[in-house]
Amino acid sequence: MAKPQIWVFMEQRSGALHEVSLELLGKARELAAASGGTVAALVLGADVTGLADTVIAHGADIVLLADHPSLEPYRLLPYTFILAQACREGRPSILLFGATSMGMELAPRLAARLQTGLSAHCIDLRLDSDGNLLQMVPGWGGGVVATIKCPRHRPQMATVMPGVLKKSEPSPRSGQIINLPVGADLDVSGPRVLEIHREEPQEMPLEAAEVVVAGGWGIGGQEGWKLVEELAGLLGGAVGATRPPVDEGWASEAQMIGQSGKTVRPRLYIGVGISGMSHHVVGMDGSEFVVAINSDPQAPIFEVADMGLVGDYREILSPLLDAIRQRLKP
Ligand SMILES: Cc1cc2nc3c(=O)[nH]c(=O)nc-3n(C[C@H](O)[C@H](O)[C@H](O)COP(=O)(O)OP(=O)(O)OC[C@H]3O[C@@H](n4cnc5c(N)ncnc54)[C@H](O)[C@@H]3O)c2cc1C
């Protein structure tokens, strides 16, 4: 098997590394151990040289570093330019990104520049006996997991869902730091960031919650959504959502669970008015106990549920909320 050069894009904002980058490093290390390959981490930003030690401790043999004031905040075009240049010179065999908003914007543009393919939203990665990257992607509504490989083009590029791979643990290791050239003209190219508005974080972060109450299109509007929020609040849990409530503005993007959203593994997941399309289910099927509430007895969510309640959610939630309120009364 050829020894692959595995590159990982380390997503950082204001010097804080995104968890998915450490998860990707863990996977890259595992693939390198199986193939005798090397792992390089791409770190771009301003004042990010200090991240190199962390990245090496988490599994990188080499840090490819671009530390320049014009690289903070993140901007698509300068990042694409630097990464494309680095790839043309370093010729990695594999290049991995988190399937975050940054990764989902950057990776396809870079793939087009490098004239290679890209598998989006992977849930696992392996190597075949020839050293080709096997990229596992949920497909056709999530009913199957397709294995994609890209035998003729390099690098083999993939974005991987946050939360599906195991994060690498830091250990004392040594590595090499290579500075990437940053052109003086980067400042003038493309759109500029004028202001950054930070969304208020949920009181209970979705990924850490032991109870998740998720609502879907079947909730029907803001009024019903309040019941979902109240149930989550009374159970000390977090509110999740499928794609349609996010599109409707009942829930925020950060609350979306699934292939393009977050992966949750709570002790209790309650899905209300959710059909159970695979795009959503891939983000919640690691939950310990799943309760589904749906008016359609044929809804696919019941196939992954430990307990199913068939009926109009209002008729089910109203007495349930009353009973919980009653029990919580001092
Ligand atoms: C590339 C791609 C990525 C995607 N990524 C995601 C993702 O990350 N996350 C995600 O969630 N979706 C994602 N989607 C969308 C996904 O395919 C589904 O469209 C979505 O999950 C459906 O959401 P839903 O179950 O809320 O709505 P629907 O499928 O419309 O289901 C609504 C359910 O509510 C039930 N219902 C209606 N009224 C009531 C009532 N009064 N009481 C009880 N039940 C009721 C209905 O019986 C139905 O089963 C993606 C799609 C694509 C193409």
Image (cartoon, grey):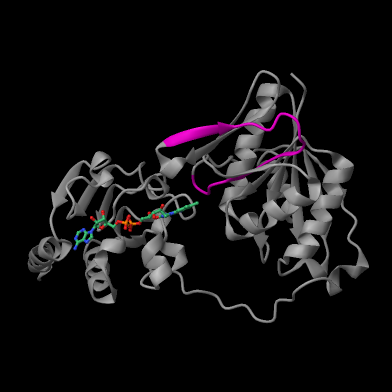
Q: Vertical placement of 268 versus 230: above or below? A: above
Task: Provide residue 221's location: percent of width, then percent of height.
Answer: 28, 73
Q: Nearer the viewer, residue 326 or 75?
A: 75
Q: Quadrant of residue 103?
A: bottom right
- In the image, which residues are magenta? 144-163
> Which residue shows up at 75% across the image and 30% down it?
152
Left/right of residue 170 with respect to residue 236 in the rendered view: right
Residue placed most toward the observer, 218 or 122: 218
The outermost residue toward the bottom is 194
Whether 157 is among the magenta residues is: yes
Q: Position of residue 145 (x, y in %)?
A: 47, 34
Residue 278, given in percent of the width and then of the height, sits at 39, 45
Q: Quadrant of residue 75?
A: bottom right
Residue at point 42% right, 41% down?
A: 142
- The spot of residue 45 in percent (x, y) is 76, 62
Q: Ligand 1 is located in which of the four quadrants?
A: bottom left
Q: Is residue 135 left or right of residue 92?
A: left
Viewport quadrant of the N terminus: top right
Whether residue 187 is in magenta: the answer is: no
Task: Report whether 295 appears left or right of 284.
Answer: left
Q: Does residue 267 lie above or below 198 as drawn?
A: above
Q: Residue at x 83, y 71 (%)?
A: 189
254 with respect to 19 (left or right): left
The image quadrant where one finds the C terminus is bottom left
